[in-house]
């Protein structure tokens, strides 16, 4: 049963979709629930149990949510443990994998615990003191954003489409509609939500493309590859978006600009922003042409309201 219950060590949260409790917390997603409990500061351990959740449910949780929890835990006397069958929390400082495959008979054995096989797949804990000392000086983030990500994937290596109106549809929908389009298509009067026939009625020159999941995966891998040249702390934030945490804040715009150029050489259009917080870098990346650096996140947030 999806629920949340209090235990002596702290809180265990189970499930991804079912509501729990009452009041303001009732309709919050697991990362939001964990955020509330961690900010309380009275629990030494918060466990988010997602073992029984399907992968399609877990993929709906934005990676930025886990990244915020990681930033929050670093300054609190609390540990946050996420249990899942899939690698999904890219910001985790310590990742342990249980390699055993047990059945009921195994648990009846007296030496079951002695046969545990746990592998450390990632550990940044030994870097924590170093990172914390650097954060006291300055910490910066960069968000690299690929506009019209799905459309870029579907039209990559097709330079002849650059000047033509192009609209993208989701082929597997019962009633396919335009989900992304380029500037030429917008200028022709085509809008998101139109059917292909409606788009063609606005412009007979429009090229209708369908989503290409394989190409989307390929472009995302290229994006992450170049992001890791900037820092070992990279979050796969969302399709067409990644967030980079810097501990060396020198010449960031120049470094990020080189990555934008490298992506362009791969026929991938990208823009990026550098800011003191991950949230402000994400917002600014949508405004960058192609790189924007924000020094004061609070002032930038006020201007965006």
Image (cartoon, rainbow, N blue to C red):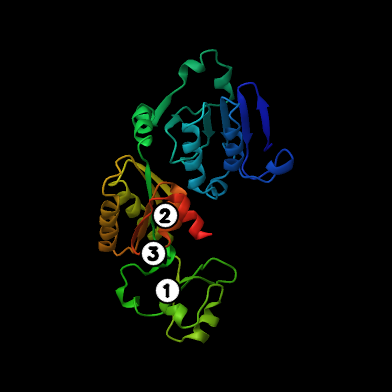
Q: Position of residue 43 (x, y in %)?
A: 59, 26
Residue 70 or residue 304, whichever sits in front: 304
Observer-nearest of 50 and 142: 142
Please give the name of the residue rendered at 36% of the width and 60% of the height, measured from the top-left corner: 271
Q: Is residue 305 above or below residue 97?
A: below
Q: Is residue 269 left or right of residue 192?
A: left
Tell which of 53 and 228 is nearer to you.
228
Mark 3 → mark 1, Cα distance in angstroms: 13 Å
The residue wearing badge 2 is: 241
Distance Cα–Cα, label 1 vs label 2: 19 Å
Q: Compared to 297, does 210 lie above or below?
A: below
Percent of width and height locating residue 203 = 47, 85
Mark 3 or mark 1: which is in front? 1
Question: Quick one: label 3 or label 2, which is nearer the N terminus?
Answer: 3
Give residue 43's mark. Answer: none
Give the residue displayed 50% in from the left and 79% down from the top.
Answer: 190
Question: Residue 286: in sight, yes or no?
Answer: yes
Seen as rendered, the residue at the extreme top is: 110
Q: Tag 1, which secondary structure?
A: loop
Q: How far across and how far down the image is residue 116, in percent?
A: 47, 21
The residue under label 1 is 182
Please state the horizontal and vertical placement of residue 192, each as a whole percent of the image. 53, 73
Q: Earlier in the sequence, mark 1 or mark 2?
A: 1
Mark 3 lies on residue: 153
Quarter of the figure with residue 166: bottom left
Crowding at dot 1, Cα within 10 Å, few <14 / some 14-19 / many 20+, comes out as: many
Q: Secondary structure at mark 2?
A: strand
What kind of element bears circle 3? helix
Q: Is residue 283 left or right of residue 61?
A: left
> Which quadrant of the figure contains the C terminus?
bottom right
């Amino acid at each position: 049963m999806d629920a949340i219950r209090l235990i002596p060590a702290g809180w265990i949260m189970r499930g991804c979709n079912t509501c729990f409790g009452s009041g303001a917390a009732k309709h919050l997603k697991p990362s939001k629930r964990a955020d509330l409990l961690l900010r309380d500061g009275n629990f030494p351990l918060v466990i988010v149990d997602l073992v029984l959740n399907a992968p399609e449910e877990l993929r709906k949780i934005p990676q930025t949510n886990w990244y915020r929890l990681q930033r929050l835990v670093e300054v609190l006397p609390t540990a946050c443990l996420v249990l899942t069958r899939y690698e999904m929390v890219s910001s985790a400082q310590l990742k342990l994998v249980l390699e055993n495959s047990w059945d009921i008979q195994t648990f009846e054995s007296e030496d079951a615990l002695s046969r545990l096989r746990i592998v450390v797949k990632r550990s940044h804990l030994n870097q924590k003191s170093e990172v914390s000392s650097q954060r006291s000086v300055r910490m910066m983030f960069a968000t690299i954003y690929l506009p019209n990500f799905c459309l870029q994937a579907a039209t990559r290596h097709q330079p002849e489409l650059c000047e033509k109106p192009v609209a993208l549809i989701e082929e597997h929908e019962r009633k396919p509609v335009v989900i992304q389009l380029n500037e030429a298509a917008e200028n022709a009067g085509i809008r998101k939500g139109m059917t292909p026939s409606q788009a063609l009625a606005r412009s007979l020159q429009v090229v209708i493309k369908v989503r290409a999941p394989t190409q989307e995966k390929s472009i995302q891998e290229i994006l992450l590859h170049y992001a890791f040249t900037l820092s070992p702390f990279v979050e796969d934030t969302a399709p067409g978006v990644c967030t980079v945490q810097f501990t060396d804040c020198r010449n960031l715009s120049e470094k990020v600009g080189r990555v934008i150029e490298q992506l362009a050489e791969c026929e991938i259009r990208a823009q990026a922003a550098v800011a003191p917080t991950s949230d402000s870098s994400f917002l600014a990346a949508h405004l960058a042409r192609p790189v924007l650096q924000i020094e004061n996140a609070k002032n930038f947030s006020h201007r965006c309201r």
